[in-house]
Image (cartoon, rainbow, N blue to C red):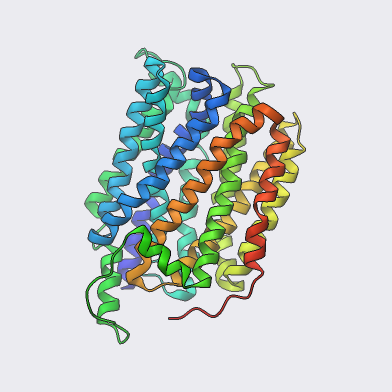
Amino acid sequence: MDRIQRRTLRLLFCTQIIGGVGLTIGISVGALLAARIGGTGISGLAQSAAVVGAALLAIPVTRVITARGRRPGLVLAYLTGALGGVLVIAAAVTDLVPLLFLGMLLFGGGTAANLQARYAAVDLAPPERAGRQLSVIVWATTLGAVVAPNLAQSADDAVAGFGLPPLSGPFVFSVAGFCLAAGVLLGLLRPDPLLTARACADAGPDAAGGPRRAGGMLAGLRIVARRPAARLGITAVAVGHLVMVGVMTMTPVHLGEWHSDDTVLRVVGIVLSVHIAGMFALSPVVGWLTDRFGRRAVILGGVATLLAAVTVAGTAGHHTVRLTVGLFLLGLGWSGTMVAGSTLLSESVPVADRPSVQGLSDLTMGLAGALAGALSGFVVELVGFPVLNVLAAIAVVPLVALALRPVPPRGR
């Protein structure tokens, strides 16, 4: 079993790097491309379309994972993201806003695959190391995602000779990355970690027997409603993502207000690279803290970091360095809520119920982030970037209240 888990972790680590490049290089210019085609007001809507897509794709991907395992579900998500990238390129060529939205919606498949991979890492993980092994897969995204925004200009230059418009080049690289990740998983993710975990659970002393339970969103909702620890885990993931997406989405547009077209891509690349480093680079440390001090303590630490982040970013004005520090803290706070919340959620339910609960978490997280992304453009246009950060701080209050409530010991 340990051998299978080590092989699974190595494979997921590699595909997270590949998929991370594909996902981040497109996301880094998504708002700018939308602003060029349809104006600043819809730039947040285009980004939120990708978040909504990731959320909605959690439904079919969860059903596939429940019925057939992690491998076909991850492959489906990556190929859907690749199709979305193709449509975004077509939208850039034709200046069609509806096509851009459809492409970004499907592009969310890359995010869906990226998120589901962290759950595949804990299917066979020992409970005392679950936080660390989940965080290693989250961290793997760093190796591709941190450098990806800085490749945006090079990607644009590389496809310029083919007649493609500005800002479409990064999506060409996204399509290639998603297809490569899907091919690697399709050929090499064997045996499937979820199917293996199920077989072990069915053969163990606590096996319940009987038919396999349904894996829809309603089933996941019923399970979460009965388990306080699962409720805390799913709320931590959703609220952390809402705050992060809302502020991060408008940062490139905010930077574009005082940087010229010749330099904005490079500045955005640096700022977002630092932000992504905050999200992923320290995740192994966050995972160790999660196993050492407990899931709830790390969730509260993540909330405190998010509050510090929006304070720094919201008061940065036109100081790029200070804004960069705020974005780093924003990523670090997201890491705390994501790693600790996902670990708590996964371990608080039986193996048979995990896909439906994890799919519900990704759906909830995606919808929360989509709401933040959709509203962020209008908030910035009407009242400015600082007010957006104030609203983000208010959004974490319910999570603080829930995290401070006593959580009964989880059942095994």
Q: Quadrant of the N terminus?
A: bottom left
Between 178 and 5, the one lying in front of the other is 178
Up/down of 162 relative to 77, above or below: above
Residue 234 image position (x, y, % from top left):
51, 61
Q: Nearer the viewer, residue 100 or 131?
A: 100
Q: On screen, 381 above or below 399?
A: above
Q: Quadrant of the C terminus?
A: bottom left
Query: To which quarter of the image does residue 191 belong?
Result: bottom left
Q: Is residue 137 above or below residue 389?
A: below
Residue 192 image point, x, y percent: 26, 62
Res. 8 in view: yes
Residue 264: horizontal and vertical position, in percent?
60, 23
What residue do we see at 42% from left, 57% from top?
360
Q: Position of residue 173 (x, y in %)?
A: 38, 31
Q: Residue at x 29, y 39 (%)?
A: 179
- Picture residue at 38% right of the left edge, 46% below the top: 56
Q: Residue at x 57, y 58 (%)?
A: 337
Q: Does 75 sit left or right of 18 as displayed?
A: left
Q: Would you say 318 lies left or right of 234 here?
A: right
> Can the viewer see residue 111 in this picture?
no
**Number of numbered markers:** 0
Front residue of 65 and 189 = 65
Quadrant in the picture for residue 98: top left
